[in-house]
């Protein structure tokens, strides 16, 4: 079974739920990735969430998280996953930026005990995977992905060189917009700091160490410049004190503000609807080709899948998705590096909801993405299949 690429989801689940609403009674096809966003969709009352991922380890991760939601109370769940070190909510300002980034032996042993309470709920493949990963479980599985390890290096080696710990602490504990702007201007004006950020977010390091080389293959222009600009927006226009993703990047733990699926009021909603979750280890293309054409979905959560694909492959997949969309269907995806939207889709298949996407992206607390795409299935989609069939025919 492959290694984990992601220990958690790195798309803002609040924006995802807003984009796909209403979800009550909907059938949803969702890229599993770290798992939380598929669980957040369950909490909204979807009649079925089919979570797929081509990487078996990501499916094993979601299976483990689903088992934990079914077996543990919200406080123990957060400790088990690695969101918190104790089941009580962290006090405001109580989580130090300069504090240790590894769990104590006692917390690690407690997580292993919690795992023993969950393991009987796992399928055979997931059980084999996790029984061989006691260190990963002891550290908290939210820490376990390749991308989270990259962020840990960023936290250890780069963050202190961008601003001293006391400066970051003040930012994360609450400054108004004017104070945040002054903070940014005062602390991040040196050429050395800008060069350091551009290096960390470059294709070479981000693709080679953080995600995968294939993910940055199709990007154009300066990807690091885009990421730095989005980071500036996250630090000034939005409030870092309320941004759980930024807290994790800088501290390696969440504080009182949590991603949607981990909030104590949402956990019971997920648990109540766990029977609606289906897991499939496969690619999206294979899943669509291997299931019956009559199987339709109301909503599609595609993560940043199209970053990995050529324009032609994206066009063909958009056509296949449209043929499997129920009337009134909607898809959501993020662009991290490549420009992939429904302008590539077969004619009369998808309609971009550009205004809605731009408004949601303005409030998106994850700064890795340059663009959010929201699109609705068009009523007239008769040409979609014809265009895709023509593309597959050999040239005369």
Image (cartoon, grey):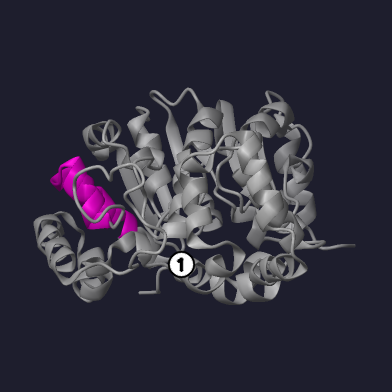
Residue 376 quadrant:
top right
Per the picture, the main secondary structure of the magenta-coloured stretch is helix
Q: Quadrant of the C terminus?
A: bottom right
Q: Nearer the viewer, residue 328 or 72?
A: 72
Residue at x 77%, y 67% (from the top left corner) = 191
Residue at x 35%, y 35% (from the top left corner) = 42
Residue at x 79%, y 50% (from the top left corner) = 390
Is residue 7 within the magenta segment?
A: no
Q: Residue 193 appears at what percent x and percent y?
A: 69, 67
Q: Residue 16 appears at what percent x and percent y?
A: 52, 36
Q: Is residue 111 left or right of residue 177?
A: left
Q: Residue 151 appears at what percent x and percent y?
A: 49, 66
Please name the residue that numbered disc 1 is placed on.
5
Residue at disc 1, secondary structure? loop
Q: Quadrant of the N terminus?
A: bottom left
Start and end of the magenta stretch?
61-81
Q: Is residue 380 left or right of residue 290?
A: right
Is residue 64 within the magenta segment?
A: yes
Residue 352 in view: no
Residue 195 quadrant:
bottom right
Residue 159 in view: yes
């Amino acid at each position: 079974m492959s290694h984990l690429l992601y220990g958690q989801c790195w798309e803002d689940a609040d924006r995802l739920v807003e984009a796909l609403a209403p979800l009550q009674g909907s059938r949803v096809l969702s890229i599993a990735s770290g798992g939380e966003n598929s669980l957040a969709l369950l909490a909204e009352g979807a009649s079925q969430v089919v979570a797929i991922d081509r990487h078996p380890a990501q499916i094993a991760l979601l299976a483990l998280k689903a088992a934990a939601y079914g077996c543990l109370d919200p406080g123990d769940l957060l400790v088990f996953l690695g969101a918190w070190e104790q089941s009580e909510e962290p006090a405001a300002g109580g989580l130090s930026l300069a504090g240790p980034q590894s769990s104590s032996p006692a917390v690690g042993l407690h997580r292993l005990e919690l795992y023993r309470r969950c393991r009987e709920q796992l399928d055979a493949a997931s059980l084999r995977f996790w029984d061989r990963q006691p260190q990963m479980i002891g550290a908290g599985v939210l820490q376990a992905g390749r991308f989270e390890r990259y962020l840990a290096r960023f936290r250890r080696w780069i963050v202190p060189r961008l601003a001293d710990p006391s400066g970051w602490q003040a930012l994360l504990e609450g400054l108004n917009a004017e104070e945040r702007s002054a903070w940014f201007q005062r602390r991040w004006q040196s050429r050395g700091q800008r060069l350091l950020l551009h290096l960390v977010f470059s294709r070479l390091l981000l693709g080679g160490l953080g995600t995968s080389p294939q993910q940055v293959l199709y990007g154009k222009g300066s990807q690091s410049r885009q990421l730095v600009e989005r980071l500036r927006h996250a630090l000034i226009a939005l409030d870092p004190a309320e941004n759980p993703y930024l807290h994790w990047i800088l501290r390696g733990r969440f504080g009182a503000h949590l991603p949607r699926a981990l909030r104590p009021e949402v956990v019971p909603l997920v648990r109540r609807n766990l029977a609606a979750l289906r897991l499939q280890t496969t690619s999206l293309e294979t899943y669509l080709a291997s299931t019956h054409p009559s199987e339709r979905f109301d909503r599609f959560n595609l993560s940043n899948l199209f970053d990995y694909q050529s324009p032609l492959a994206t066009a063909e997949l958009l056509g296949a998705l449209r043929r499997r969309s129920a009337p009134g269907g909607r898809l959501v995806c993020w662009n991290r590096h490549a420009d992939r939207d429904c302008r590539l889709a077969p004619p009369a298949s998808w309609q971009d909801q550009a205004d809605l996407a731009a408004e949601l992206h303005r409030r998106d607390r994850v700064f890795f993405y340059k663009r959010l795409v929201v699109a609705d299935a068009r009523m007239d989609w008769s040409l979609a299949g014809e265009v895709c069939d023509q593309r597959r025919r050999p040239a005369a």
